[in-house]
Amino acid sequence: MPSFPQPGSVTICEINRDLITADNLSDDQAKETYAKILGTVFSPVPFESDNLLGTGDEQPVALGQGGLGFLSVTLRALLSGSLRPLLRPADVKLLQAVDLRGVSWHQHKHILAFISGPHHVTIRDYDDSDRKDPCILINESQKDVKILEWRPNGGKTLSVACKGGICIWSASYPGNVASVRFGVTSGMLSRGSMTRWTLVDFLQSFDEEQITSLSFTYLASASYESSSFTIWDVAQGLGTPIRRGLGGISLLKWSPSGDYFFAAKFDGTFYLWETNTWTSERWSSKNGFVTGATWDPDGRMILIACSESSTLGSIHFTSKPPSLDAHPLPVELPEIESLTGSRAIEKIAWDASGERLAVSYRDGDELYKGLIAIFDVKRAPLIATSLIGFIRGPGDNPKPISFSFYDEFKQGPLLSVCWSSGFCCTYPLIFRSHVLP
């Protein structure tokens, strides 16, 4: 039977397909369970959730009445030389439905970053021996934060998508100060350790667009306001826009190897690119637009969630890169509808071993609202899933705002979740079969 956390309880961790719960949120339960295995405790990080929920200032397009209203908007856009008003989602809820990555672990360090307010990012360094307080990144250039990503193999460098561009933060130490690009209004913050976080660059978006999607191998960014995405040369501070189709972009995802690139749009289409010659293949969804996507560890298949379905889609590549030959297959998660009563998946995350899949869903029965479903995944070669159970967050009626995996522990991945109740909690998922890729 899948593990079900009773109302009023909180989840602590998984140990071999058993999701452990407690009556309240404290480090004591962690010390009695996973700390004996991992040798450390990942204390929850509090934040002001009231400042984070419902912060989007995007406005729906005012199309007026009938075709004349749309024609008026079109003419104004053409005369102004900008098609941006036509590319905005007609309903502001479209952007809210997309899995904007608000939680990110450093690739090699035990450092967690998450969006903690409309203009704020919180960093918790679990390797910091002082461990007093997390550091909060604030700068006048950092407005309306939507998504963040650590730069792979780039030291301690964090990219933050916001209004008008991308803030690049880097860690500085005594005797090793991060260099700041000329003309950037730098911010420098320090709390509880010798580490200082410096705003070293601000990559300005075209037409001051609100950046709503980021992805690395190379830094790629996109906006719901534009039909193009941008590949950045971070060292030079220069971006190259690439366009396919007309719809605004909902999300971007590099494959683990960097051979493929995924770009989804609000009109229900998505594009698979091979990055050798930057050739693309257009696909379309019959179940709304893509709200979430995650690659398998080998980069040969991508899972996608759509706005109007409780079933995941998978695109399998049938040949080696740079071939774009691929075929789609459904990935059924029957318990999402049969147990929870939900008819649509919200967010998905897949750990680097390919053995654990985290899924949140929209609405559902009162008993299952706000939970995260954890699935065991087998790939041989098609995907088969088995529901392990559900994670419940702390506080009254908690709902997951964002979540992400960290995959550097031999005993199993860590799932970090920002909850609407104002806590960012980390859940070790410990199981015997886990092997690092």
Image: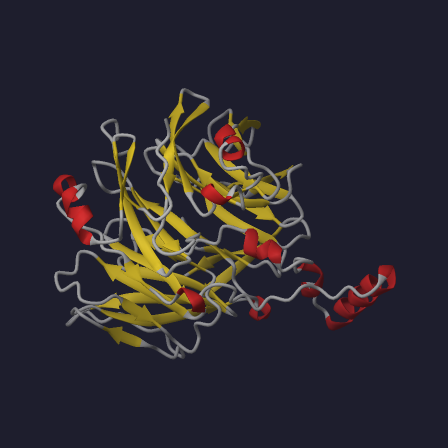
Percent x, y for residue 106? 29, 53
Q: Do we see residue 230 in this rendering?
A: yes
Q: Residue at x 33, y 56 (%)?
A: 424
Side of 44 where 214 appears, left or right: right
Quarter of the figure with residue 195: bottom left
Quarter of the figure with residue 405: top left
Quarter of the figure with residue 343: top right
Q: Nearer the viewer, residue 436 or 368?
A: 368
Q: Residue at x 61, y 57 (%)?
A: 93
Q: Quadrant of the N terminus?
A: top left
Q: Which residue, as the protein is rendered here, is positioned at the far top?
A: 380
Q: Do we see residue 218 in this rendering?
A: no
Percent x, y for residue 282? 63, 39
Question: Is residue 308 shown above or below 183?
Answer: above
Q: Quadrant of the C terminus?
A: top left
Q: Count up the numbered dots.
A: 0
Percent x, y for residue 267? 67, 48
Question: Is residue 240 shown above or below 270?
Answer: below
Q: Residue at x 44, y 38 (%)?
A: 295
Q: Nearer the viewer, residue 272 or 1?
A: 1
Percent x, y for residue 367? 46, 42
